[in-house]
Image (cartoon, rainbow, N blue to C red):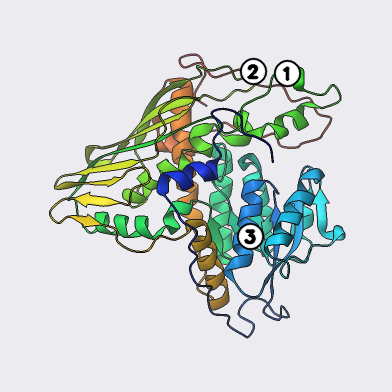
Amino acid sequence: MKTPKPGYTSRRNFLGNSSALIGGVMAAPAILTGDLFAAGNSDTLRVGLVGCGGRGSGAASQALSADANVVLTAMGDAFGEKIPPALRELQQQHPDRVKVTSEKCFSGLDAYQKVIESGVDVVLLCSPPGFRPVHFRAAITAGKHVFCEKPMATDAAGVRSVMATAKLAKEKNLSVLAGFCWRYDQARREFYQQIHRGAIGQIRAIYANYFTGPVKPMPPASERPKEMGDLEWQLRNWYNFVWLSGDGLVEQACHSADKIAWAMQDVPPLKAVAVGGRQTNNHEGNIYDHMFVVYEFPNDVRAFLGQRQISSCHAENSDCLMGSEGVGKITGGSGPVIQGRQAWRFRGEKSDMYQNEHNEFFAGIRSGRLINDGEWMAQSTLMGIMGRMAAYTGQEVTWDTALNSQESLVPESLDWKMKLPIPPLAIPGFTKLI
């Protein structure tokens, strides 16, 4: 195991530490018999994993823990060397559930398609988010239930594709689970239920933050092997490139944007303005390390979202909802509290939100009460993209402008030998709103 660099913060560790989660797991859903899932499936749900990094391995483990009759049968990643360690870890955790043979380990840019075509029933999409729209579309078109890690796209073109695919999933009666894991945390579910019932009156303002260290610092160009092409170099350092990650606001702080959307009952903002920039050396990367977005909602409601990923700075992941008759707070590792007409504090048992979402996902597949998070997961992603667009350009960005933007960051086709120039860091006032 590599020793983390100073200031390095993994997404899971940051979310876990900030919410003081413990390892409790909800009971696995009851197993139903019959052909509720797929004809000829013998009630065994076959899972394929696309993207074998830490989040992908975690999602696969949670899928295997969610249902007593789930097996992992296929794994794929752009880089083949990522598969063996992930496979070994999963075999240790679930020795009787991992049925992946060498013939079902796929590498390369088309690995996702091979996993989808390998005879699986459920696909876990955990590759860098720039690929999400294409992978999502392929899986749903092929008739697979999908776990879709957040965010769902890195540009508006991708969001529109995801929206269309989510609609197709409903038509095909397929389940779509979003990786916006806070929505499956019981404490926050009860908190937002209280908010929506009027516990603090009418929401007047929301302040959310996502202050942490850099997730994956960009190495200097001198560390790039001479034989390594542009695409491989960027994929191996995907977090540092806008087309692959969407930037920190979209890839990381989208959780905070999603909770703002949740508080507003998924009514989208009217417009946004933002500031941001890069204060630390990112070598060839082209993402900002801080942004601050002001979203305007109907009835003059404002939401403020601060995002920063710089080492040796104050770390916090909190939400404060200010209403006409009180305040609701989720502060760091503390449980949600409401100070209003009637004080409220979550007093239930803590549980693992990562596991909860997979428990509900597979229980829905078994029962036929399918989950489809498609519409709101796309809107929450667009909220992050909208904020980035405002910060990069220095312009006010309306929801319609963001949704209909013609900016397309992801290349239409990819090849290991292709030339892939790195766009310069955005400069507000000079970078154009497309």
Dot 1 or dot 3, earlier in sequence: 3
At a point 72% along the width and 60% down the height, the residue shown is 92
Pointers 1 and 2 in contact (C-beta within 8 Å): yes
Residue type at the position of mark 1: Ala
- Name the residue beneath numbered marker 3: 61
- Name the residue beneath numbered marker 1: 221
Tell me the distance, in whole angstroms, between the alpha carbons under discs 1 and 3. 35 Å
Q: Which structural element holds mark 1?
A: helix
Q: Is residue 255 rendered to the left or right of residue 423?
A: left
Of 3 and 86, which appears nearest the observer?
3
Q: Is residue 124 rendered to the left or right of residue 112?
A: left
Q: Which structural element holds mark 2?
A: loop
At a point 35% along the width and 48% down the height, the residue shown is 267
Q: How busy is the neighbourhood of tag 3: few (under 14 within 10 Å), some, or many (20 plus)? A: many
Residue type at the position of mark 3: Ser
Residue 194 location (% of width, % of height): 25, 58
